[in-house]
Amino acid sequence: QAGFSARTKYCAEISESDDGAHVVLAGWLQNIRYLSYDVNFLILRDTTGTVQLLYRDVDLQGPHQFDLISCPLESVVLVEGTVKARPPKEKRPGSGGQVEVIVHKYTLLNPADRELPFYPAQVVNLPSSEFRNTFRYLELRRQEVGDNIRKRSKVTRVIRDVLDNQGFLDVETPILLNSTAEGAREFLVPTRLHRLGEAGTPVVHMQGEPPRIPTFYALAQSPQQPKQLLICSGAVEKYYQFARCFRDEDGRKDRQPEFTQLDLEMAFVSWAAEEREFERNWRIGGVEVKEVIESIVRRIWKDVEDVDLPEAFRVITYQEAMTKYGSDKPDTRIPLEIVDITALLPLEYQEELLRAPAFQGRAIDCLHIPLGSQFQVQGMDRLLEQIDPQGKRIVGPVVFTEDNFLQWFPRHPRVKFHDESLIRELNLKLDLRFGDTLFFSWRDELHSGGATPLGALRLALAERARTLGTYIPPKEPHFLWVTEFPLFGKYEEKDSLVGGEWSSTHHPFTAPMAEDMELLEMGLSPMLGKVRGQHYDLVLNGVEIGGGSVRIHDAKLQEWIMREILKLSEDEVGRFSHLLQALRSGAPPHGGIALGFDRLMSILCDTPSIREVIAFPKTADGRDPVFGSPSTLLQGVLRPYGLAYALKSKFRP
């Protein structure tokens, strides 16, 4: 291929001030309009935008081996020409729309195939995203997808600038780690390295012996342990990195098997709230982490979105979030709150409810939808059936009328609510009007888990109202800190990852609240559910975009929780021996947080899925449509790792 000139301008950089200037452009042929045999218009695209080319034989300088308009769309070309301001009636808004370039010379740098799977500028009959992602290199040429990637890069620069100015060090941590019982399922990586014997030397497999025991790395679920060790070392007091993380979990629209998080850790964080923060409802330690994150988020929204955010974000406790909104990551844009009726009852009724078995209900919540509300939508019965198909979790809908204004309170198997004066008082406190719709749900006195039945109904009603056009979410971002989560919980999906009845709701390194240390030290199962952790989540518009905690820096407490509460085996505790030893070596109080960077970018780019802000995303079930992973391997490849296919099958590689 002959030599060619260097590009002098990008498409979007050309303006009317360049009228008459000579430019060299490079990019992809996006469209061709044939006006006549000697006058044609072409659209040239590069990463900044598009510009129109005026292509006429009379303007060409020197011979050319081929006709530019005969090139297939998406061919890569270099064009030399003169900028010409477009007539007023032909100008279009946006970059490059005020001018056109008269073509004098052109070079075909690389012709595209005549038929491509799809075309980036295609609007009509655009294939599904699953099909397009198989050819992700073409999908990335689409303007909105490319803009997402460029915006992601800009946000990354903003974050680095903020953290660098606050004295944080960007430190890379290992990706190949040892398997530990931290919570999520891990990706395991077999290795040809032999296991170590009692003497600390590799146990070499001799010829003729049975196949050796394979050894594995685990891909890092997060840099949790390495970053704590960094802080324990004292060499780094403020750490951050854009960390690649790996979790073998089922795919969702906001989850990928590999993802990126902004990871932070700080030494000498507080274990108690300052007075001004306590007044803002932040009653735990780690306020230093909170302030750093708020400064990052404010800067992002100002520099990228030109939006000014408040100096401090709203703070609510986990119990308040679950009670008012029915979710541990509430969307506070929705002007619909759940009411804890239990708190409105006389004390004798509350005490009687507390004596009832937990499965019968010790508290009652109510979702009250006034007559004429934007959320009093058609099809509420069908929404309820989807959320509670067996009709055991929600009572309703109950329409408040003249016939039932003294009998609407739902029945309880143990406590009787027949006092008319009580119901009349509740009517006043709830401000009930004839035609209002009520939903009820009995629950235990303290919330657990991530959502309640009424919380799910609240979201479903808001989505239904949004679809019908009666509710339009405000554009202003609603940031929210949720704090004081239960330190321990019982989760069936984590049964295989812990040894006992209790598991850590965040991770086993989260510190308890100082006020709850006495409950924790009792070690009694009924009390453990009441122990709160110094754990905080950052929520934006109903999406958790980050979570962190103050860490346990006392080795005795850390080991006691592992052994006595989580009931980890000796081998499982041994896998944390490096961390326990570091805590015994003079570890400062520390805490941190991780922001889900993909989720954050999905919100900033207003995309339905995080896959739209990742250059090469996986599918919903974790497969790579471009590179074809995961895949099977030949037996010969597995043998050096001590692995073999367990089943004999004609389909075995």
Image (tube, rainbow, N blue to C red):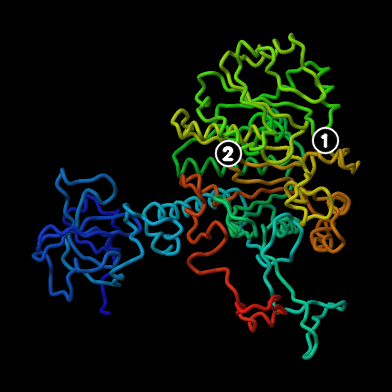
Q: Quadrant of the rendered structure where residue 271 is?
A: top right
Mark 2 lies on a secondary structure that is loop
Closer to the chain start, of discs 2 and 1, is: 1
Give the residue type at disc 1: Glu
Q: Percent x, y for residue 387?
A: 62, 37
Residue sitting at x 57%, y 60%: 622
Residue sitting at x 52%, y 43%: 299
- Label of residue 162 in the image: none
Report crowding for label 2: few under 14, some 14 to 19, many 20 or more residues within 10 A (C-alpha).
some
Which part of the image, by quadrant, shows the N terminus? bottom left
Q: Percent x, y for residue 336?
A: 58, 27
Report crowding for label 1: few under 14, some 14 to 19, many 20 or more residues within 10 A (C-alpha).
few
Q: Percent x, y for residue 403?
A: 63, 12
Q: Which residue is mark 2?
A: 542
Q: Nearer the viewer, residue 50 or 325?
A: 325
State yes or no: discs 2 and 1 in contact (Cβ < 8 Å): no
Q: Percent x, y for residue 125?
A: 33, 54
Which part of the image, by quadrant, shows the C terminus? bottom right
Give the residue type at disc 2: Gly
Could you tell me how far apart the alpha carbons at marks 2 and 1 are, in whole angstroms? 29 Å
Foreground disc of the pair 2, 1: 2
Q: Nearer the viewer, residue 282 or 602?
A: 602
Residue sitting at x 17%, y 46%: 90
- Label of residue 515 in the image: 1
Mark 1 lies on a secondary structure that is helix
Residue at the top extreme of this rendering? 421
